[in-house]
């Protein structure tokens, strides 16, 4: 039948490459109020010297302008999502913990703030622990780390880029990366992982996200 | 002044006019009072000092500007940036640090420490100082 010819003559749907079939976002890129972000800004602004910040997300021109011009920060862009993508495409995600242990060139206690965004959501526990250890090492007394932690696991979720709209508003933007599985870390796991830091603020938001701010005591 | 895409320079490149590089440079580029443009075909492995730097190609190394660094779409920088203004386009790649408080040195300021004679380079068109490979047809 003609329909059979059309079916056999057409291309078969491609087997989804695990590294490239992350679900695409739908609709406009939403701006979402953040409760932890303004707290992080206050902590960083209170530092006596020129603040040093690490951003684990990809570079966004507007974020650079915000931190550089508005806060006078020295900003390190350490795009860990790109690292994750590389490992995912190479099939070496199991090597991520070891890679994270040697990833950062920053001396101990040299950083005032760390923006993790939702990177921890994509890390299995060993990698999450390795990264937390590095954050603790790099964070100065009085410094803070901000992370977004999901409350819902997912076998496949897209990466997001977080664009700063204002002190308390972040636009969740599409990220071209491969995305990955999202893991849920219980609060006690997060606290244990960041041993030496204290949870100064924790907010449960409507979209299944916990925003947490952890500080190193001065 | 243009350096064409077939030109490869290893060494120190300095001058007092605007320069566009479409070739490869390894070493150091110093145009403290002028605009340096790394074209889409440009591949730089060097420390860069200029008044303004516009990047459409690839730079591995630190970039210092007294006015502005502008990484355009498809431009790529792996290194540290020091400039009072930094613009990064949506499709650009960047990894390193950005320091907008540290200024590279305004025009007319004395050269930074490390310069042997403590004076600015003489006014001259951009010239490479060490080995240069320039096949026939290199652009000017």
Image (spheres, rainbow, N blue to C red):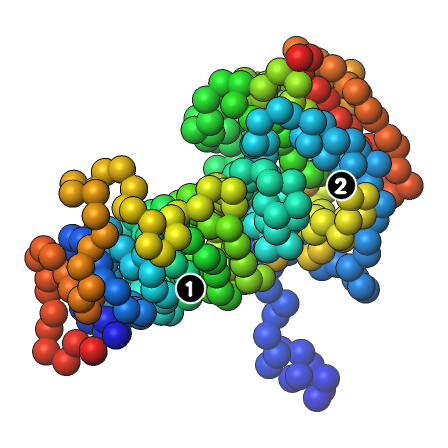
Q: Please state if B26 lies on the left or on the right of B40 as rendered.
A: left
Q: Nearer the viewer, residue A169 or A72?
A: A72
Residue B44 visible in the picture: no
Indicate whether A170 appears above or below A100. below
Quarter of image, res A208 = top right
Q: Residues within 10 Å of mark 1 (few under 14, many from 20)?
A: some
Badge 2 vs badge 1, beta-carbon distance below 8 Å: no
Q: Position of residue B135 (x, y in %)?
A: 10, 73
**CA separation, marks 2 and 1?**
41 Å
Kind of element beneath mark 2: strand
Identified at 28% across, 46% down, the residue is B111
Q: Position of residue A79 (x, y in %)?
A: 54, 43
Indicate whether B18 appears above or below B44. below
Identified at 66% across, 12% down, the residue is A218
Q: Position of residue A9 (x, y in %)?
A: 60, 81
Kind of element beneath mark 1: strand
Q: Residues within 10 Å of mark 2 (few under 14, many from 20)?
A: some
Quarter of image, res A45 = top right
Residue picked out by circle 1? B54
Identified at 34% across, 64% down, the residue is B34
Q: Please state if A9 lies on the left or on the right of B70 as rendered.
A: right
Residue picked out by circle 2? A154
Name the chain letter of the residue that bears numbered label 1.
B
Nearest to viewer (mark 2 / mark 1): 1
Q: Nearer the viewer, residue A12 or B62?
A: B62
Identified at 50% across, 29% down, the residue is A100
Indicate whether A158 appears above or below A53. below
């Amino acid at each position: 039948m003609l329909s059979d010819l059309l079916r056999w003559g057409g291309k078969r749907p491609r087997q989804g490459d695990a590294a490239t079939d992350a679900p695409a976002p739908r609709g406009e890129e939403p701006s979402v109020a953040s409760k932890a972000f303004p707290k992080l800004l206050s902590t960083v602004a209170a530092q006596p010297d020129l603040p040093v910040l690490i951003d684990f997300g990809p570079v966004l021109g507007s974020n650079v302008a915000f931190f550089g011009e508005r806060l006078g920060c020295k900003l390190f862009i350490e795009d860990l999502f790109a690292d994750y993508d590389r490992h995912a495409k190479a099939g070496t995600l199991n090597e991520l913990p070891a890679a994270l242990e040697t990833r950062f060139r920053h001396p101990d206690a040299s950083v005032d703030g760390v923006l993790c965004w939702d990177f921890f959501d994509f890390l299995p526990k060993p990698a999450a622990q390795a990264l937390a250890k590095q954050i603790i090492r790099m964070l100065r007394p009085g410094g803070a780390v901000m992370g977004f932690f999901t409350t819902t696991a997912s076998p496949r979720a897209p990466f997001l880029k977080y664009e700063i709209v204002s002190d308390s508003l972040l636009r969740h933007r599409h990220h071209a990366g491969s995305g990955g599985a999202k893991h849920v870390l219980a609060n006690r796991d997060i606290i244990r992982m960041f041993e030496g830091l204290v949870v100064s603020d924790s907010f449960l938001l409507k979209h299944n996200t916990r925003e947490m701010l952890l500080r190193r005591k001065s | 002044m243009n350096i064409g895409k077939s030109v490869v320079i290893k060494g120190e490149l300095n001058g007092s006019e605007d320069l566009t590089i479409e070739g490869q440079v390894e070493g150091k580029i110093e145009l403290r009072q002028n605009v340096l443009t790394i074209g889409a075909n440009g591949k730089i492995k060097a420390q860069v000092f200029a008044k303004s730097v516009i990047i459409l190609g690839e730079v591995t190394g630190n970039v210092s500007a007294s006015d502005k660094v502008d990484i355009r779409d498809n431009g790529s920088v792996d290194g540290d940036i020091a400039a009072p203004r930094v613009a990064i386009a949506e499709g650009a790649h960047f990894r390193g640090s950005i320091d907008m408080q540290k200024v590279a040195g305004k025009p007319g300021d004395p050269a930074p420490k490390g310069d042997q004679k403590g004076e600015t380079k003489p006014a001259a068109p951009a010239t490479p100082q060490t080995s240069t490979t320039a096949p026939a047809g290199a652009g000017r």
